[in-house]
Image (cartoon, rainbow, N blue to C red):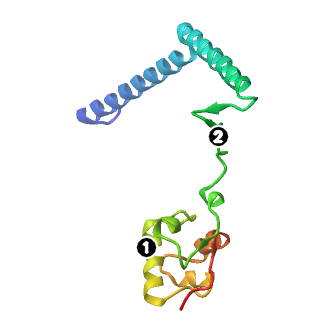
Amino acid sequence: MFAFTKQEQRFVLFLLFSFLIGLGVSYYRKARLARPNPEWAATQQAALQEFQSSSQATAEANGGDTLIAGKPEAKPIPLHVSKASLVSKIDINAASAEELASLPRIGPATAQKILDYRLQQGAFQSIEDLKKVKGIGPATFEKIKEHVTVKASLR
């Protein structure tokens, strides 16, 4: 084999065989997934039909509202909704660490820094004062400014 030593030739052969085995495994997995199990498909279809019929019966019994454990059916949150859109305005002078951590780009460590700053420097006078907290730069401030407020503080 070319100008390789015996050890290099073995290594190249090992790589070649490993590659071929990998291709075989990949092909097998794709072929296996492409061929559905008819028993499983029939079971899934029967379960889906049973669920749909029981949901309709429950909705009809409750006047059109589907109930799950006594509560109206919750609407799923779309995947494109960020945690920022779920947060109402937070008063940064009264917020807890958990409330601050719910803001976009603010984790537990930065929330603690905000609390420490508030203890050392006093109440925030405006939301722009958040930029003075280490770890909150212009990009982070832009993400959180619409979710925070400063209410009148008792000094």
Q: Which amino acid type is shown beneath numbered disc 1?
A: Gln
1 vs 2, front mark: 2
Local secondary structure at mark 2: loop
Marks 1 and 2, the one that precedes in the sequence: 2
Q: Residue at x 71, y 22 (%)?
A: 56
Residue pointed to by mark 1: 112
Local secondary structure at mark 1: helix
Q: Which quarter of the figure has residue 144?
A: bottom right
Q: Is residue 87 left or right of residue 26?
A: right
Distance CA(mark 1)–CA(mark 2)? 33 Å
Q: Residue at x 71, y 26 (%)?
A: 59
Q: Is residue 99 left or right of residue 2?
A: right
Q: Residue at x 44, y 20 (%)?
A: 24
Q: Residue 74, which numbered label?
A: 2
Where's residue 75, x and y in %? Answer: 67, 41
Position of 5 relative to 38 (above/below): below
Position of 123 relative to 107 (above/below): below
Residue situated in front as seen by the camera: 62 or 141: 62
Where's residue 82, x and y in %? Answer: 62, 55
The answer, for residue 36, to whether it is visible in the render is no
Q: Which amino acid type is shown beneath numbered disc 2?
A: Ala
Residue situated in front as seen by the camera: 4 or 13: 13
